[in-house]
């Protein structure tokens, strides 16, 4: 065995040789070393699957979808084209993209009963809660989605979900605003249609500025997939039970709802507002070093270099602010980034801006309230979730998720009658 690991069990003196494949060992191989298992909270060094969807090199700041650099896709591609790439492994031809765009556009409308479901939420219901519930409910409208072994049926459900996510997201937004829902306009592109459903009022047709449409395309592309993050892991874990894709994606939305995952850009805005002016930045930096403040939007579990998505979003800010006017928080953000990147405290800890540092500024400039930020994230992430789910379904190595535990509770206690307690 050429690539292998030799383990000496000091409890018994026995040595065991374990094969190394793709820089990993199989955790099940450790069983022969005295029945050992690994303990890895948060899966910080555990691979749960083989995947050909997304490649990340955190040390070099590289992000690729199916081998294509994120920088090239953000500059030259559209969100639906990237969605096709993630789901099929190759960029579409002109005819393939035309058919894919037609299929998605054909499914943008919601069943009226879904609309009735959404109108039943309280006036102050969080849009993410509405999104999660509505996506989960889709499984009851399309019971054939349970037939996940049929490739044609999988394609149909995937198409439906990518098509309906912007409609559900827009309806959730309008509900929170107390405004009437706007139906899709299938004459518009994917992102232009979403903006129309969000912001159209009494005008005959809503025409969004093309620079804003492009910025939204870029934001969706940057969020389309990101390897085995918390929400993708949730989709795969729930999907491993062979449930329908709507239920699996609803689990991903639930994971994204948490502030440690999807809510980071809102935390950045709160931080920038608390800083107030550029004059307060030095004092804030000292507070971070002293453990009294948190620097939000810097650092990443995977990236130990500049997040490549942050570079692209930073450029997109210029186009958006040319239309909407400059967000006054931008100057604070830029100065904070400049000082942090020159400070040895942050450089030595490899704390660089991540995708959330600037995305909140763009969302706010587009007039989205903070509670909509994660909804936008979820819409962009949907094709990635579905690509990962589809990969899981056809992967013969995958089994239903069932991690081990280390039991720390009491053992073999005798029941005490109520009168003796």
Image (cartoon, rainbow, N blue to C red):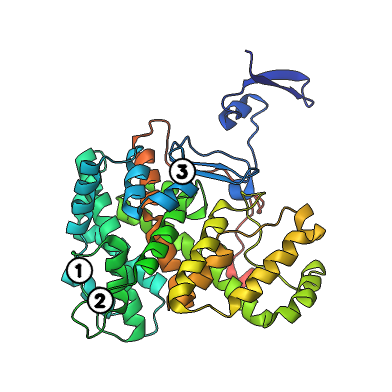
Residues at badges 2 and 1 in contact (C-beta under 8 Å)? yes
Can you identify the residue that label 3 sits on?
Answer: 401
- Of tags 2 and 1, the one toward the viewer is 2
Under circle 2, the secondary element is loop
In-image side of 303 versus 194 (left or right): right
Q: Where is residue 300 in the image (x, y as percent from the top left)?
A: 63, 55
Under circle 3, the secondary element is loop
Under circle 1, the secondary element is loop
Q: Position of residue 351 (x, y in %)?
A: 70, 57
State the quadrant of the C terminus: bottom right
Give me the residue at 64% from left, 30% from top.
35
Neighbour tally class for label 1: few under 14, some 14-19, many 20 plus, Cα within 10 Å: some
Distance between the Cα atoms at labels 3 and 2? 46 Å
Q: Where is residue 293 in the image (x, y as percent from the top left)?
A: 74, 73
First in sequence: mark 1 vs mark 3? 1
First in sequence: mark 2 vs mark 1? 1
Depth check: give the residue in front, 74 or 397.
74
State the quadrant of the N terminus: top right
Can you identify the residue that label 2 sits on?
Answer: 206
Can you identify the residue that label 1 sits on?
Answer: 185
């Amino acid at each position: 065995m050429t690539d292998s690991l030799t383990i000496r069990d000091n409890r018994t003196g026995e040595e065991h040789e374990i094969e190394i494949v793709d820089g990993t060992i199989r955790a099940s191989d450790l069983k022969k070393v005295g029945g050992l298992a690994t303990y890895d909270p948060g899966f910080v060094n555990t691979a749960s699957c083989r995947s050909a969807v997304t490649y990340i090199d955190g040390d070099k700041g590289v992000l690729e979808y199916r081998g294509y650099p994120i920088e090239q896709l953000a500059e030259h591609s559209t969100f639906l084209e990237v969605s096709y790439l993630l789901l099929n492994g190759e960029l579409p031809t002109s005819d393939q993209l035309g058919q894919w765009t037609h299929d998605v556009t054909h499914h943008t409308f919601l069943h009226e009963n879904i609309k009735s479901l959404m109108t039943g939420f309280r006036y102050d219901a969080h849009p993410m809660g509405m999104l999660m519930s509505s996506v989960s409910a889709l499984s009851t409208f399309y019971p054939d989605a349970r037939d996940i072994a049929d490739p044609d049926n999988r394609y149909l459900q995937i198409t439906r979900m990518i098509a309906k996510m912007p409609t559900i997201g827009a309806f959730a937004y309008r509900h929170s605003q107390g405004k009437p829902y706007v139906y899709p306009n299938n004459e518009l592109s994917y992102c232009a249609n979403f903006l129309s459903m969000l912001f159209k009022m009494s005008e005959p047709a809503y025409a969004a500025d093309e620079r804003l449409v492009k910025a939204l395309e870029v934001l969706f592309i940057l969020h389309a997939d990101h390897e085995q993050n918390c929400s993708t892991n949730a989709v795969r874990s729930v999907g491993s039970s062979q449930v329908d894709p709507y239920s699996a994606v609803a689990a991903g939305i639930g994971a994204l709802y948490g502030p440690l995952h999807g809510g980071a850009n809102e935390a950045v805005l709160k931080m920038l507002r608390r800083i107030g002016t550029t004059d307060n930045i030095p004092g804030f930096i000292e507070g971070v070093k002293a453990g009294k403040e948190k620097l939000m939007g810097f650092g990443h579990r995977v990236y130990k270099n500049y997040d490549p998505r942050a570079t692209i979003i930073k450029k997109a800010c210029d186009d958006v602010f040319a239309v909407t006017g400059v967000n006054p928080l931008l100057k604070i953000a830029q100065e904070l980034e400049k000082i942090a990147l020159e400070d040895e405290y942050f450089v030595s800890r490899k704390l660089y801006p991540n995708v959330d540092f600037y995305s909140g500024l763009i969302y706010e400039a587009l007039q989205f309230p903070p509670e909509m930020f994660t909804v936008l994230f979820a819409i962009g992430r949907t094709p990635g979730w579905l690509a990962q789910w589809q990969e899981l379904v056809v992967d013969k190595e995958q089994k239903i998720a069932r991690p081990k535990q280390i039991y720390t509770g009491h053992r073999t206690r005798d029941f005490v009658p109520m009168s003796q307690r």
